[in-house]
Amino acid sequence: MERWKPAVEQSAREQRLLKLAGKSRKLFVFLREHRHELFDEAFQDELEAMYRQTGQGQAPQPPAMMCMALLVQAYTQASDAEAVCLSGTDSRWRMVLDRLGADEDEPAFSQGGLQQFRERLIATEMDRRLLERTVEVAKRTKGFDSKKTPKTLRVGVDSRPLEGAGRVEDTLNLLGHAGRKVAEGMALALGTDVEEVCQQADAPLLRASSIKAGLDIDWSAPDAKVDALNRLCQQLDRLMAWVAKQSESCVEAPLTRYIEALAQVREQDLEPRPEGGVQIRQGVAADRRISIEDPDMRHGRKSKSKRFNGYKQHVGTDLDTELVVACAVTPANRPEEEATLALQEDMAHQELFPDVLLIDRAYLNSSMTEDVLASGGDVVCRPWRGASAKPGLFGKRDFKVNIRDGTLTCPAGEVEPFEPGAVVQFDPEACGPCKLRSSCTQAASGKGRSVTMGDDEWLQKRLRSRLQSRAGRAQLRERVGVEHRLAHLANRQGPKGRYRGTRRNLFDLRRLAVVQNLEVAARYQRAA
């Protein structure tokens, strides 16, 4: 396999290009000056290990050059087709890829080769290794002074919503989309066209430009939607019965994917109708699929009023170096705490373990929080607000919690023992004649005040005490560093994902984080 051996010394032409690029695209300058450090011999060995050394087939392009192309593609946010074109026509691309001496307008790689290299990185987890590599290079950059950074590792974790690339559809369109794909797959397997398949399967609706256009009904009429749904389901039943009669060799992996998607949508969105047939299910099924082409996309909420469809991106940032050290992507409906295992795994590969973890409340119940606390580390987070007290009544914060003794003292001085996660019931005989009863509870006569204690009450008390001091509030504000990193990533990527599927979107997040880290390294370089 040919190894990439880019020149270190700069030619006169490269110096002119670097001067021009430094005014608007400064990362081109850093990549040209440090590409030999980023892709040193040891790292190129790792990249070449992704390939089988059989000597068969066409020799691949140097893996290090292809990896550099993926980074420049992320930096410029070019499509695969644009990246191929720019590798042959843009002088800055050609300079960074060490192609200035090659024939003009000759692309450095093909679009298929770029896609295959990306899939190879994903399959071998080398995209994570590339992120680790940028952290290593940044910390060796002139201007980075390890003596000035604290000995303790402070990691900030946060997330942002990412709209998925798949089309989000209602139940009728999900069913029709999946059915159409099944028909197209059968047509391809049998060497015929979709019209012929739909005719043989007696499913004419699947030939229409859209399912709703094919149904051609007055949607405002009573029961129109139910009747249309049952017409579609009957034709899909006939299609699947026809597919079952065909040779098993016709039903290959791509077709199976759509057959399974069709079955999943019917199970999650439909229910039997008392009069016969089916109807739209009342309520929303757990983990409901919302896209045929991207099975991992889900409905999610950033807040009560803001909903999105797709994924959540999570990053862990070393707040003292501003480097992204861990990435994770989860479907939009999954809680933030589920991402921490992946973040911990990324950091474990770099032998990093947070001494101080700065998070928001969504990550409080995570394994990462538990591990940091168990190791004697600190967690910086705002405490849970707790159940809102009624106006004019004492809230939980007005009660004194003694973690060491396991007691809870009310404003009137009554003391009750408590267990984490349990509800404390104060003695009705003490609450009844209490002068503060009207300010404490509206419970019926003969009942006392109740207070719910959290499983992590000791942690909540520590977090609440931090809010009471100026230094503690200043420490809470330090998490803004990870929010800035997310803002930079969002500015580069935009609100919508480039790829379909959780794993490919994780690849893209890691690649963007690599670019972000290299820009931080470039800033270290300029500051030196």
Image (cartoon, rainbow, N blue to C red):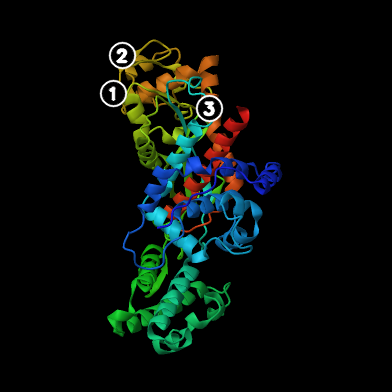
- The answer for how far apart the CA atoms under marks 2 and 3 are is 44 Å
Q: Nearer the viewer, residue 155 or 390?
A: 155
For the point 29% across and 13% down, the residue is: 405
Q: Amino acid at mark 1?
A: Glu
Q: Amino acid at mark 3?
A: Phe
Question: Which is in the foreground here, disc 3 or disc 1?
Answer: 3
For the point 35% across and 68% down, the residue is: 260
Among the two numbered marks 3 and 1 on one chain, the one whose residue lies closer to the N terminus:
3
- On screen, residue 175 above or below 193: above
**Circle 2: is it few (<14), some (14-19), or many (20+) Cα within 10 Å?**
few
Label 2 element class? loop
Q: Nearer the viewer, residue 52 or 508?
A: 52
The residue beneath circle 2 is 404
- The answer for how far apart the CA atoms under marks 1 and 2 are is 12 Å
Residue 51 placement (x, y as % from top left): 36, 57
Quarter-wise, where is residue 257 in the image? bottom left
Label 3 element class? loop
Q: Amino acid at mark 2?
A: Arg
Residue 144 shows which numbered tag? 3
Among the two numbered marks 2 and 3 on one chain, the one whose residue lies closer to the N terminus:
3
For the point 34% across and 64% down, the residue is: 55
The residue beneath circle 1 is 419
- On screen, residue 333 above or below 500: above
**Circle 1: is it few (<14), some (14-19), or many (20+) Cα within 10 Å?**
some
Q: Is residue 123 left or right of residue 28?
A: left
Residue 288 placement (x, y as % from top left): 41, 58
- On screen, residue 90 above or below 243: above
Label 1 element class? loop
